[in-house]
Image: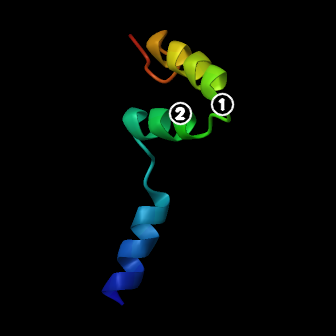
Amino acid sequence: MLKQIRNFTRALRVPNAAERETAYLNGAIDRIDLEYRQRQIDRGLFRKYY
């Protein structure tokens, strides 16, 4: 029962900015796409500055 609750809470957890950035970079299909994605992240694509 406790294992099911843990799995359920993990499924509802929202990924943080670092996890979203890593997933975005891992989706690159070639070197040029990877470099483009790195530049987007450097420009603050996943980070909100208030």
Q: Quadrant of the N terminus?
A: bottom left
Q: Is residue 2 above or below residue 47?
A: below
Q: Position of residue 4 (x, y in %)?
A: 41, 82
Which of label 2 and label 1 is nearer to you? 1
**Which of marks 1 and 2 precedes in the sequence?**
2
Please give the label number shown on residue 30.
Answer: 1
Q: Nearer the viewer, residue 9 or 33?
A: 33
User: Residue at the bottom extreme?
Assistant: 1
Give the image location of residue 24, x and y in percent.
Answer: 56, 35
Question: For the point 45% across and 13% down, which residue is it?
Answer: 42
Residue drawn at the location 56% of the way across and 18% of the way down: 35
24, above or below 11, in the image: above
Name the residue carrying label 2: 25
Disc number placed over residue 6 in the picture, else none: none
Where is residue 46? Give x, y as percent. Answer: 49, 24
- Percent position of residue 12, x then y: 48, 59
Q: In the rendered view, tell whether residue 14 sits above or below residue 49.
A: below
Amino acid type indicated by mark 1: Asp
